[in-house]
Amino acid sequence: MINSKKTRFSKVIAGIGISLSIAISAGSFALPQEAQAATSSSTASKVIATGKKYVGVPYKFGASSGITSAFDCSSFTQYVYKKNGISLPRSSKQQAKSGYYVSRSNLKAGDLIFSDTNRDGIINHVSIYIGNGKLLHTYRVGVGVTISTFAGSTWDKTYVTARRVI
């Protein structure tokens, strides 16, 4: 009987120890996620700040990668993200496969928004969601890099998907 109580007591103590170990381990996994969220927010702010430096720079379809005298939509996003340590492919169609899908209702600052403005089933425009319903992007000669309202815009009406690359 005493041996049975000792065995049961040992099992209870071992179970408590294992439970505590699991609880402590789970708690340590939560901390990096919080740190990652803070880093993501910080990176998004840096991407947006970098992009805003180029407001007013002219639009040029097919602008070369890496130049800042003129951008098209995807050379702009590629350049701005690269300046912040994030590599993106050159075209908007290719960029739409980067990172991971995010729904329109879960957009966060720094997400990429893709549109099919020709309405031909092919993504042909990318913009940076900067929060508060605004986009940072470039389009059309005479407009260039600018901030636009998303809701009700051409980019909203021809929205295809959004991707999180930060």
Image: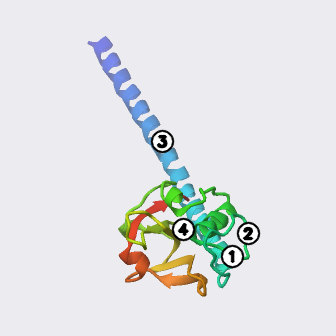
Cβ–Cβ under 8 Å for marks 2 and 1: yes
Q: Residue at x 34, y 27 (%)?
A: 12
Nearer the observer: mark 1 or 3; the answer is 1
Question: Which element carries disc 3, helix, strand or loop?
Answer: helix
On the image, numbered disc 1 is attached to which residue?
70
**Badges 1 and 3: C-beta atoms under 8 Å apart?**
no
| Secondary structure state at the residue bearing disc 2 | loop
User: On the image, which quarter does residue 145 sit in?
Assistant: bottom right
Q: Which mark is residue 110?
A: 4
- The amino acid type found where label 4 is placed reads Gly
Task: Indicate which disc, 1 or 3, sits on the residue closer to the N terminus.
Answer: 3
Quadrant where the N terminus lies? top left
* Residue hosting label 3: 24
Residue positioned most to the bottom: 142
For marks 4 and 3, the one nearer the N-term is 3
Of residues 120 and 156, the one drawn nearer to the viewer in this rendering: 120
- Mark 1 neighbour class, 10 Å CA radius: few under 14, some 14 to 19, many 20 or more: many
Position above or below: 55 against 31: below
Callout 2 crowding tier (Cα within 10 Å): few <14, some 14–19, many ≥20: few
Dot placed on the residue nearer the N-terminal end, 2 or 4? 2
Which quadrant of the view contains residue 17? top left
Q: CA distance from mark 4 to mark 3?
A: 33 Å
Q: Amino acid at mark 3?
A: Ile
Looking at the image, which residue is at 37% across and 71% down?
Answer: 119
Is residue 159 placed above or below 93 in the rendered structure? below
Q: Nearer the viewer, mark 2 or mark 3?
A: 2
In contact (CB < 8 Å): disc 4 and disc 3: no
Q: Secondary structure at mark 1?
A: loop
Residue 67: mark in rendering: 2
